[in-house]
Image: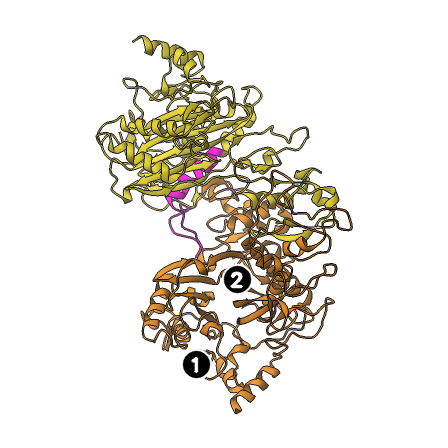
Chain colours: A orange, B yellow
Amino acid sequence: MLPRVRAAVAQLVAGLGAGASGQPPAERRGGGGSGCSGTGGSPEGPSSSCCRPAFLQLTPEELRRAGDHTGRAVQSPRDGRRRLPWSTGYAEVINAGKSQHNEDQACCEVVFVERRPSPRARRPSGEGGRELDGGRKGFYFHYWALFDGHAGSGAAVMASKKLHLHICEQLRDLVDILQDPSPPPICLPHDVRAGPTEQSRLPLTEDDGEAPNDAVPRFHLEKAVSHESLVIGAIENAFKLMDDQIERERASQHLPGGCCALAAIYLLGKFYVANAGDSRAIIIRNGEIIPMSREFTPETERQRLQFLGFLRPELLGKEFTHLEFPRRIQPKELGKKMLYRDQNMNGWAYKKIQEDDLKFPLIYGEGKKARVMATIGVTRGLGDHDLKVFSSNIHIKPFLSCFPEVRVYDLTQYEHCPDDVLVLGTDGLWDVTNDKEVAGVVMEVLTSYEPNDPCRYTMVAQELVVRSRGVLKERGWRLANDRLGSGDDISVFVIPLGGPGSYT
Amino acid sequence: MLPRVRAAVAQLVAGLGAGASGQPPAERRGGGGSGCSGTGGSPEGPSSSCCRPAFLQLTPEELRRAGDHTGRAVQSPRDGRRRLPWSTGYAEVINAGKSQHNEDQACCEVVFVERRPSPRARRPSGEGGRELDGGRKGFYFHYWALFDGHAGSGAAVMASKKLHLHICEQLRDLVDILQDPSPPPICLPHDVRAGPTEQSRLPLTEDDGEAPNDAVPRFHLEKAVSHESLVIGAIENAFKLMDDQIERERASQHLPGGCCALAAIYLLGKFYVANAGDSRAIIIRNGEIIPMSREFTPETERQRLQFLGFLRPELLGKEFTHLEFPRRIQPKELGKKMLYRDQNMNGWAYKKIQEDDLKFPLIYGEGKKARVMATIGVTRGLGDHDLKVFSSNIHIKPFLSCFPEVRVYDLTQYEHCPDDVLVLGTDGLWDVTNDKEVAGVVMEVLTSYEPNDPCRYTMVAQELVVRSRGVLKERGWRLANDRLGSGDDISVFVIPLGGPGSYT
């Protein structure tokens, strides 16, 4: 029992444990009960400072070891402690000294989405939608997320504690709609938040004498909207609200910096993988690799950023030009012809250098060294509201987007075996490896364990982390091929898609 | 001989024949000789009004038949007349009455790009770069293009006569650079337009006492730019200059409307397929389909357009909102919740309807019925400078882009057989068929002709046009499966990628 007590104390000290799974927290801000069960309670509740993920249940001694940049011990949920849902594997390691703390954060939760009480509808209980969790109406979603912080860990810590609750909040209005097989209603009547099931039970003559809005399409042109795209919209808006919350609370909660966010949500048979930043998710199915995200960097988002700089030159200050050049131009090169590209181009052409071209390019550098305004190497994520160009008053946030790209994977369309997994990793993993190598490690490790061994996914996660970190030698952390290992924080989830232990 | 004389007269009447292959036209605007050989001469020369492509060599009687909306006779270059380069197949048919003329246009040319004379460099002849075409220094490119006009055929006709000359003009500065295997120079010295071959021949001490600019990279951060991306940039800028020319000359040359443009350029071993609009190109190689373009429509470019409307609301007048709704909102629905999405979203969510949401959505409708500002169904192309929203003063051009997406296919990376082809088609083709069906027809027709029969690609093009047009029955033009055939203009190129007759 002692280690558990220690762990509880450590988490308490770190400011965790604000809510517990299955116990909805008491009423907070916003008028109603939060309606979202899972660690953390309401999205508007208090957050906390730097720590490791709650599910690791680290003792103070383990916490100290996890923070040791020299040893770089790999951390995973231990045998005998609480297992992650679906026997998910997780492993992490701290950076090699790049920053004081491990600025990656992780979260894994099962969240109950309770239908929001409707002020006007009279609902006979037990009809239209499932009753779960002690008579409450709603559904569960499974949630895994990685947050890769920069310039401090505050934003990553807060997002790891709150993003799933924002997603839950956004889904609460959709509880009935998502469980009704008919197409979502285009328009909801006044103040009625629930779906068509609910409406069809309302008398045809409402207060305003109108028939329910969606009984028949009113116009020839009416776009069909899928259930799936409502979930995508909910996730997108949850990211936005998370970002807004960080903006509001950044001073009081001490949330400097920002973070990339990669979240996988399993809901009603489908995976929704939402990515804002340079983390990456892939599915490995029967040896085949299915990319579930793409990275958002100054290079991949060059045209969006240049377009904004072109349309809103005031955002560039007097320091930057929206044009891209392959290198800095020197004043003595004025009048010569230089390669450039603007927001409309993918190719390059020559232009005569003018005074304005001597400004610094908005997008500059290549690969991992590419930067927006010489400052930041990712173009989507949460936070960074105070980020400015060094020794200037030019804000960078207008160029960053907090919106994720959401990809959908229908788990019911394919019979998955125990070796099929979804891998989520921060860039610490992907900087030194690639999809194919990761798939190789996954298959290699899984075959050495029994298919029903619940530890096998943890073993994969650990192996992935170890192989990306490498081994400490005289000339630093080195991989098996003697190349430099990743000196960054590394975090990995390995989520099984089928077989024993799944979906529980 | 008589039909040829007739054809020549018909083309003369139609205002064609401004230049002839191999004979560079005399000096016009711009100071120098045009330096671009091929039909049409200089890009700045006069254009002409509606007619069919010169390479069809139609007699007046044939011209009349080609314009008959009832018969819809398929047109192809005839046996015994000039064959298209590489034995390319081509076929077209007029619409079923949608517009008076066939608003599609086509062009197929072999163009010589002559190096622009450099005012300062002393060039010993016969060194650095090939001498071709009677001692002139340069290279050839092959060119095929389709232009799908709307609201008149003027823009399509002009683009079909001029775009390849703009591309030639853009390539003239690159003649030496593209033929030099070393990386393109990042910066060119004052007034010297040629590439590194040229520079390395200049004395190290130039007028300004500087060493040539690209002898060594001056900065650690210097982006490598490929030869390929210079060609892409040249094509992109050529589209822009073509659009500018249409803008300048639209009044004097009577160029109403606009056009989609799809061009394939074969240059130094690679195909560059440039698309601005909703035409489509695919390669069929060994039965496999390789998409070589994507369509630019209000749906595929929704977020770019919404982003612009959001950043520049003045472009929307007081009539439009940048938000998308699945249908029009009625004033009495104010205060209800409606599905919407903004420029950041791919999914949908509900929002409370406000006064501003009653405006018409910038993007509205689905599939072929999707429109920008209820007016136009394509979002990239040339022309449309005067296009306004019906009975308003709101210009649509700011939302349209004249820039193509350019995809590259390296012909040297694969040994092509005579059945491998690049198919270009206007939307008249693709509206009623798909990649797979087209590939099926290609393979079916090609196998019924000898591999060295030069007519086989024309037969494929004709069959593709006939199958999309269908057969006139009581209930209009019908396909084999009795679905409605395409009532639009249809134009198709079938370009062989290997085998006898190619590359000549």
Q: Quadrant of residue A456?
A: bottom left
Q: Earlier in the sequence, mark 1 or mark 2?
A: 1
* Tag 2 secondary structure: loop
Q: Nearer the viewer, mark 1 or mark 2?
A: 2
**Please, what secondary structure does the residue beneath circle 1 have?**
loop
Q: Residue under circle 2?
A: A268
The disc placed on residue A71 is 1
Residue A257 appears in the figure: no
Q: Is residue B264 depicted above or below A320 in this figure?
A: above
User: Where is residue B490 drawn, in percent x and y?
Assistant: 43, 27
Subunit under mark 1: A
Pointer 1 and pointer 2: residues touching (CB < 8 Å)? no
Which is more toward the observer, A333 or B414? B414
Q: Position of residue B297 (x, y in %)?
A: 52, 39
Between residue B270 and residue B290, name the one nearer to us: B290
The answer to whether residue A445 of the structure is visible from this angle is yes
Chain for disc number 2:
A
